[in-house]
Amino acid sequence: MKFTTLLLPLLTATATTATTTCYPGAPTSEGTNCLSKLSIKNFWSLQYCNYRWNVNYGDWDKWISNNASHVERGRVAKTGVFGGMEECLDAFKEAVEPCYEVAQGAYLTTANVSLEVNWCQW
């Protein structure tokens, strides 16, 4: 009984551990070729997580600019299912915050999910 009680918190902590890797490449330059952090938060984080947190969906979702040229500005892909919308939002934050100033995208892996975010035009 005591062994089970001690083991359960360790398993829970392991399941929520995430690893973030920034893409190699030049730092972002917010503007025509890259999404702003606010755009990522407002569109990808809120809209994407509302509809995709519990869907095992491996294809790319694209963010298209609103101007006449309809230029693709970013992409996100995920395999696996998050434990809830809040976990999805946290994953975006964990991927974007450490990498935004030094890379053009990032990927995050947990025990159950791989999330890939690219915030600059390909």
Image (tube, rainbow, N blue to C red):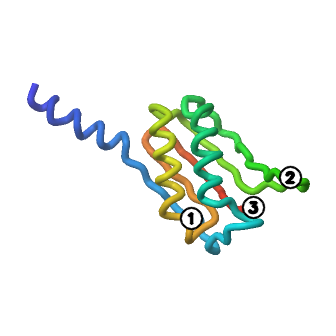
Please rate how many residues cluster around mark 1, counting C-alpha atoms within 10 Å: few if below 14, some from 14 to 19, many from 20. many
**x and y percent of residue 77 in the render?**
64, 45
Furthest-left residue in this view: 2
The residue located at (79%, 54%) in the rendering is 72
Q: Which mark is residue 70?
A: 2
The residue located at (75%, 57%) in the rendering is 73
The amino acid sitting under disc 2 is His
Placement of the N terminus among the 4 image quadrants: top left
- Please report whichever mark, 3 or 2, sits nearer to the chain's N-terminal start: 2
Q: Are marks 3 and 1 in contact (CB under 8 Å)?
A: no
Please rate how many residues cluster around mark 3, counting C-alpha atoms within 10 Å: few if below 14, some from 14 to 19, many from 20. some
SS for callout 3: loop
**Residue annotated with mark 3:** 121
Q: Answer with left or right where residue 9 lies relative to residue 42.
A: left
Quarter of the view holding residue 36: bottom right
**Residue annotated with mark 1:** 100
Quarter of the view holding residue 103: bottom right
Q: Are marks 1 and 2 in contact (CB under 8 Å)?
A: no
The front one of 39 and 12 is 39
- Please report whichever mark, 1 or 2, sits nearer to the chain's N-terminal start: 2
Q: Is residue 57 above or below residue 28?
A: above
SS for callout 2: loop
